[in-house]
Amino acid sequence: MCGVFGYVGQPTQVVPLVANALRIMEYRGYDSWGIGWDIGSEVSLLKQTGRVPAELQADQVASIAIGHTRWATHGGVTDANAHPHIDTDGRIAVVHNGVIENAEQLKIDYLIHVSFRSETDSEIVPHLIRYHMEHGQSFTESVRTTFLMLEGSSAILAMDCVSNMMVAVTARSPLRLGRRTDGWELASDPLACARSSHEIAVIPDHHLVVLTQSSAQLVDVYAGSEISISWEPTPEELSSSRGDFPHFTIKEIHDQVEVVRDLEDKFNDVGPLAEAIGHHKHIILTGCGSAYYAANLGATWLQDACDAWIDVVPASEVSEHTRNLGTDTLVIALTQSGETADVVDAMQHAIRWGANTATIINTETSTIANMAETVVGIKAGVERSVLATKSFMAMALRIYQTAAWLRGERSVDFSRLANDLDAVLRSEAISRIAYEIARHPSMIVLGKDAGRAVAQEAALKIKEGSYLHAEAFITGELKHGPLALVQSGLPCLVIATSSEELRAARIAAAEVKSRGGYVIGVGEFEQRDCSEVIAVESTTSLASLVHLAAMQKLAYHVAIARGVDPDFPRNLAKSVTVR
């Protein structure tokens, strides 16, 4: 969730420096933002609700600063609840990503006399640090002691204006350290360090990072021993821009053509995963949101390629009660960020069962990548929009390649898919139909077999991108309840990704149309079947992904027609690192 950033180094104009980093991380949360910097023995603060202003210039020069862009969990969206938070005297400032599950009890036990300025759980951290310093501990030791008191997932950056030090620590919330020519920077996303740091290190859980102008130390929280920092060159692919596109969402939808072509040459990457599947009787595919729907689609390919029993379970529903065969179960987690809290929990459950684990993932240096025994990168590149698009496409293709490997194939030709994607993304009918849909408060989406997963993802994209209520149903279930929703003008997307699906889809389209619904057929429909047709003429086994791209573009244009910025939909964040 929230984006945290810190700078320690040579004196510089810190406000624009931190603000630039926060803008890069805004997809992690954009309810409010804040910046704090050293002005002698106390912190100066600048914070407010909303997104970081496009132009935020200030002349303040400092050698230490922190910043935060917030996704609200505890306390409303107010200036007071924006980070950084400070102790009573303003000497200690803290930014926090995560949830402190025992915050109220810690207030009672240690901070009963403190007058809190905010409603957040995070504000207890600077006061606890100050409490321990007043009881004789150093700043570094106070951060360590405070961290060990917290329950839940947290990444904490704390700065002390007197010692001019910054100490950071994390548990199940990502944190990266960047080495600059003029100092150091810490961020919850390596993107924020990509333009300014020439080396980046992953900060492991339960380790303190201690920064001064001239040094960076990594210390084990429990043992207190210093360990070496593993530096890697900053990857070139971390940089990203919208180019000539108005939003990252539509750019990343179009990026899918190139993603498809790139993955064709990386077929051999799936070999270890296919071999792992072949050694198990039970496979669980899991993920959250779009990754879960990608798993649903992928399962339709896997179940025809192997003898194992395939289950698809939302990560939030994986528990000790989930059906498993222990060592004969392989749990495959699909995830873009590799940091999603529910997916981490699911993997931990799998490990406790004694199951084997694998992941299909975009961020190969993440928590989940480090947990899994088998890792298959989706190679989708940076995905900046909160709406997942190219990551879904790449996850699905990795499962398709895995199924092909299990069938004995050693290559898959994606050229036809790339051409079909390019063609459907040029469709002028999609934007016109989107503007008609945007006039309505709700809609339904129908699909079966592979089309069911496309319908689920289409409904999700429309909901999260435009706030129009969209609900997906299995085509054959229309008469068993959902048909009651149909009234004059109600938009209904009917998706058919194959000739088998098309027969049922035509029947459903006729039923909705006869009751006054506005029916949009997606596939090889005749115009007489529907009110409108979004033509998708792909006949390959990957036709469902062409339908998917059409639905992504439709959702994008519905958002634009409703005046919503699809890169930053309300109440959402790209990486959900809290439960």
Image: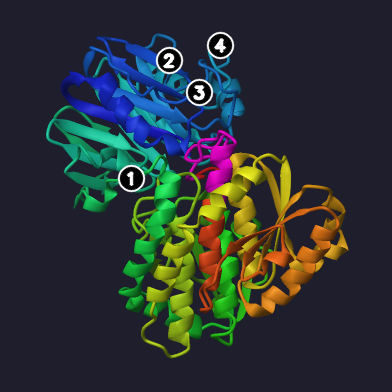
Residue identified by numbered label 3: 124
Q: First in sequence: mark 2 or mark 3?
A: 2
Q: Is residue 569 magenta?
A: yes
Rounded to the nearest angstrom, the CA distance separating label 2 from label 4 is: 13 Å
- Nearer-the-camera pick, 309 or 561: 561
Q: Position of residue 240 (x, y in %)?
A: 30, 45
Q: First in sequence: mark 4 or mark 1?
A: 4
Rounded to the nearest angstrom, the CA distance separating label 3 from label 1 is: 25 Å
Q: First in sequence: mark 3 or mark 1?
A: 3
Q: Is residue 514 visible?
A: yes
Mark 1 falls on what kind of element?
A: loop
Report the residue that reaches farthest toward the front: 528
Q: Amino acid at mark 4?
A: His
Q: First in sequence: mark 2 or mark 4?
A: 2
Left or right of 246, for residue 543: right
Residue identified by numbered label 4: 113
Q: Nearer the viewer, mark 4 or mark 1?
A: 4
